Image (cartoon, grey):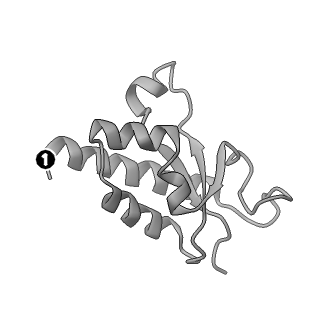
Amino acid sequence: MNVKRSIAAALVVCAMVAGMAIAAPTNSLASPSTACPSGYTEPGEATFAETLTLPRITTGLTEGAYTVPELADVFALIDANEDGRICLKAVSNLRGNSDKNLGAFYNGVDNRPRH
């Protein structure tokens, strides 16, 4: 794996782990239709197969920012309850440069944390 791809994969993991820490999901934060915490509605709850069709993920795959096996590893890390679903949201607009700098990434949290 080249250095650029390693850095990109590390950023994906960091962004998703940061999302898990910040969101601190609980049942009180979940919306009635999904188990996603507040703010994780776009694109929202998804399976691994569904994540592969999301615009930012397809961009990252096309640009070589990461590979499908790397995404599978990150998905498994986030899916602590092992139900095959996680919650995603687009990385926030950081001074207007979100698409430029982080256009291939989402923040992710588990949809129903293990208790």
Give residue 106's position: percent from left, percent from top: 51, 44
Give residue 107's position: percent from left, percent from top: 53, 48
Q: Where on the picture, by quarter, is residue 35?
A: bottom right
Residue under the point 44% across and 68% down: 77
Residue under the point 42% across and 33% down: 102
Residue under the point 33% across and 38% down: 62
Residue 25 or 65: which is nearer the viewer? Answer: 65
Give residue 90's position: percent from left, percent from top: 56, 39
Which residue has dot 1 on it? 2
Q: Which amino acid does label 1 sit on?
A: Asn
Q: Is mark 1 on a helix, strand or loop?
A: loop
As drawn, the residue found furthest toward the bottom would be 115
Q: Where on the picture, by quarter, is residue 3?
A: top left
Give residue 30's position: percent from left, percent from top: 78, 59
Vertical position of residue 38 compared to residue 90: above or below? below
- Horizontal placement of 52 versus 81: left or right? left
Q: How many marks?
A: 1
Vertical position of residue 63 compared to residue 95: above or below? below
As drawn, the residue found furthest toward the left would be 2
Q: In which quarter of the image is the C terminus?
A: bottom right
Q: Where on the picture, by quarter, is residue 85?
A: bottom right
As drawn, the residue found furthest toward the top would be 96
How crowded is the residue under tag 1: few (<14 C-alpha within 10 Å), some, or many (20+)? few
- Horizontal placement of 9 versus 99: left or right? left
Vertical position of residue 58 compared to residue 17: above or below? above
Residue under the point 57% across and 71% down: 84
